[in-house]
Amino acid sequence: DGVSYGLLPRPCRALVLLNPLSGPGLALKDFQAVVQPMLAEADIAPTVFVTERPQHAHEKVRDEDLAQWDALVVMSGDGLLHEVVNGLMERRDWEAAVKKPLCILPGGSGNALAASINHYAGNARAAKQELLTNCAFILCKGLHTQMDLVSLSTASGKRLFSFLSFGWGFISDVDIASEKYRKLGNARFTVGTIQHLARLRVYQGRLSYLPADAAPGAERAEPPAPVPNGHAGSILPPAETEAPGARGEGALPEDSLLVPLQQPVPAHWTVVPEEEFVFVYAIYQSHLGSDLLMAPAARLHDGRIHLFFLKAGVTRVMLLKLFLAMEKGTHLDLRCPHLRYVPVRAFRLEPRASAGVMTVDGEALACEPVQGQVHGRLCRVVCG
Ligand code: ADP
Ligand code: MG
């Protein structure tokens, strides 16, 4: 059950999902000018699928015969890769489908996974064309390995798979409100941060988590006994409660660390005593944007959710200092008493009001109670 690395075959058949409107709107032009000549040298044959609307890429990979492809490449921001991951997880054969090597080429305004992979590869910080060239070169080399995914469940019954982040409060509001500045590329977050500092607000809710270093024996949410809420069939042996076709055909991975949202979190979880926050941000890769190194310790498959939260009472000056320090990843060195960082395996967030937005991989989600847990090494990604 160790870490596995693989190499893309040559010739390599790559399906490139490209959002022509992502970032400054140059994805197609940059792909043709920068990426395509490099791929030709590396014996990688791209077939470009230009998305025409949101969810187009989701439907494409959900319904596609994946045997035709050796890799699925996303040339866009993180939002399009989020669609691709969730499209794959909707397939009956998700367990095999999600092992198809994925690759991100930064074409959007939020390119956090591309920046993280560039960082893991040992490259200096890069943005724009330089980051694109680095990521295209990483694809040409063709090494791929496992990546963790986080399974998120909401009170209204949504189940989502996330490769990058879950957020609530200040950072998420900036992310969504600044989408109108997409043409600025990554600078959209800086502009948005300054604007939002002026009207800093507090977000009320309860945050709970399972620390990553909790004793392994105490990790499972429940003993493998009948489920407490007395669903009919809960006392049947597992073989009869499983869907026909069992393992991997349909049934999604089980969230063994979580109990239903209507129940209190398990006793060995930590409940944060304060209930007023400026933001809660759970990130599973190192970068929040191409110049925001939020979780320097994060790696592709470290089995951890890097949970940050900023408690209410922080000054605007300190908030600005934290964001500026994040450029180098030194924000924890400021020892701000309002900022907390804990590596966890699972978390739950219960907002008190449904105002505002939450974000998953930078995409907006209606604000409601949500919980999630990490699934180590669930998918594969091209890395440095
Ligand atoms: P960016 O980093 O610029 O936000 P993303 O890849 O995150 O780029 O894409 C932003 C959004 O655009 C995603 O929600 C995606 O579903 C949507 N999208 C994809 N293709 C199109 C299209 N052709 N027209 C409009 N929206 C699209
Ligand atoms: Mg986006």
Image (cartoon, helix red, strand yellow):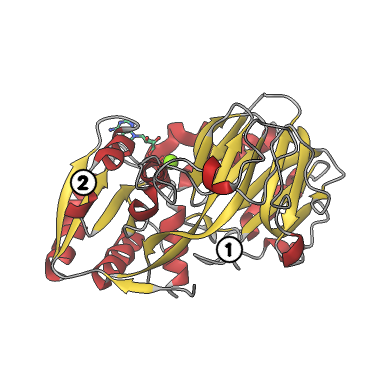
Q: Earlier in the sequence, mark 1 or mark 2?
A: 2
* Position in image of residue 234 (x %, y %): 65, 38
Q: Residue at x 19, y 42 (%)?
A: 49
Is 321 situated left or right of 252 in this image? right
Nearer-the-camera pick, 144 or 289: 144
Q: Secondary structure at mark 1?
A: loop
Residue type at numbered disc 2: Asp
Where is mark 1, residue-wise? 303
* Position in image of residue 45 (x %, y %): 13, 59
Q: Secondary structure at mark 2?
A: loop
Disc tally is 2
Q: Residue at x 21, y 39 (%)?
A: 50
Residue 13 is drawn in which quadrant?
bottom left
The crowd level at tag 1 (other Cα within 10 Å; few <14, some 14-19, many 20+) is many
Q: Ligand 1: which quarter?
A: top left
Residue 311 is drawn in which quadrant?
top right
**Residue 5 to residue 170: above or below:** below
The crowd level at tag 2 (other Cα within 10 Å; few <14, some 14-19, many 20+) is few
Is 48 situated left or right of 292 in this image? left
Residue type at numbered disc 1: Gly
Is 28 situated left or right of 324 in this image? left
Nearer-the-camera pick, 140 or 122: 140
Where is mark 2, residue-wise? 65
Instruction: Evaluate whether residue 30 shows in this view.
Output: no
**Residue 251 to residue 13: above or below:** above
